[in-house]
Amino acid sequence: MKLSFHGGAQEVTGANYLLETPKTNVLIDCGLFQCPQFCSLQNYDAFQYDVASVDALFITHAHVDHIGRIPKLMREGFRGKIYSTAPTKEFSVLMLEDSLGLLQKEADRHGVEMFYSEDEIKKAISRWEVIEYGKQFSVGELNVMFTEAGHILGSALVEIAYGDKKLLFTGDLGNIPSPLLRSYAMPRGVTHLVIESVYGDRLHESSTQRKLKLERAIEDTVHRGGTIMIPAFALERTQELLFELNELVEHGRVPSMPVFMDSPLAIKATSIYKKYAGYFNNDAKKLIKEGDDLFRFPNLHFTLKTEESKAINNVPPPKIIIAGAGMMQGGRIVHHAMRYLPDPNNTILFVGYLAANSLGRRIFDGAKQVEIFGERIPVRLDVRAIGAYSAHADHDALMEFTNATRDSLQTVFVVQGEPHAALFLSQRIQDYLGIESRAPNIGDGFEL
Ligand SMILES: [Zn+2]
């Protein structure tokens, strides 16, 4: 059996792993390379393996860095089946269609032909089967099972058994406890673990601190009569924020003020969350049973249309604007940033991962001035971050997860992290747990 790494290797994005046995070839995830821009030119390169010989593709979850190259895979001749949970399939369609527009614009800017079209999204959907958590199924010689990953709704750990070996691909591992989702189960009997490392070298604050920080950021800004901008990712973070804002407002812990959910993608994703409420944890389910609409509260406005988004500017502060994209590499947040960055009364609150060189990261790192649409914009507002909103497990949680199946582990492959994070976690696993661990480079392959 051979495992090779075709993305997500010493980088966060582009996850794409190929597992080959004598009779069966499968892929785990097929993500977009997203650094430093939404789309890296790397995405245009042909896949470095025989796409037509791949029997199946397993998808861990619907973030673009795990699904964004699926239509390209179709274009290059993939004829196998795609498997994921039901929410992942539904989110993926939404995300792929949304990405198409952004990717097309970037392709035009670089003067290159876009690497997929609407057609290939449709082809992918027609080959896509949904599988419940905990249900075993087989593809060729492999026995496969999805279990909860606690990262975003529908996210899965992919377990693949072959002979006396059991491989586990974490995709992205959640940051538990999540306000909405159930936790992942600790792994057992795994011989080869492929583990993410986005926060492989860092720790998060606790979830109580996180709510307190959110409350403080709002109160301080209200006190100054300012506006709070929250760049948010369409999946999970946004819904978690709405959930916690809902609680703060309903318990009178922050004054009522207009909250704008200014992201068409997040608005659509939120309706998928409502549809799959059965996937929530018991606490969230209980609230729904008691009649609480988790994603609705007084003064919350969903601004789907462009005119509605523009009209937010006319609403006097204090107000809260939640808009995509999360790293500010595009989307409506960029327009709001031009207006609100120069005023010291305002606050920008980061709640997720910020890739090196993204606009969000530059502001977070303390840039006094940034360039947006060719204009120099001074950054004078209050910059804050709440790490615990990250949907990723931190260093300690990743170590604990690995340690849970230490007795059976032969090798750990640390992926989906910037080099420092991946190498740090890998070294710790070797030194502290005594397990062989590697942080592979792109193109590396290993006989298992
Ligand atoms: Zn993810």
Image (tube, rainbow, N blue to C red):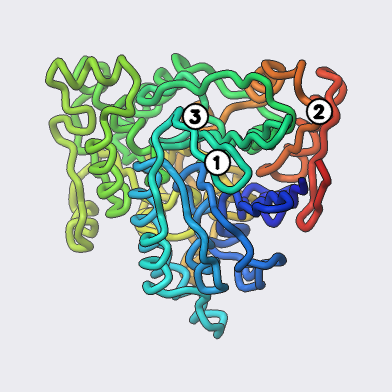
Tell me residue 113's x, y (percent): 53, 83
- Three-letter code for the amino acid on which mark 1 is drawn: Tyr
The N terminus is located in which quarter?
top right
Name the residue carrying label 3.
147
How far apart marks 1 and 2 lie (CA) works out to 30 Å
Q: Is residue 278 left or right of residue 199?
A: left
- Three-letter code for the amino acid on which mark 3 is drawn: Thr
Question: Which mark is nearer the camera, 1 or 2?
Answer: 2
Residue 200: give its label: none
Residue nearest the viewer, comparing 61 with 345: 61
Secondary structure of the residue carrying tag 2 is loop
Q: Quadrant of residue 208?
A: top left
Residue 61: in sight, yes or no? yes
Q: Is residue 293 left or right of residue 106?
A: left
The relative height of residue 394 versus residue 162 in the rendered view (above or below) is above
The relative height of residue 214 versus residue 305 in the rendered view (above or below) is above
Residue at point 39% right, 56% down? 95
Name the residue carrying label 2.
410
Residue nearest the viewer, comparing 17 with 113: 17
The C terminus is located in which quarter?
top right
- Three-letter code for the amino acid on which mark 2 is drawn: Gln
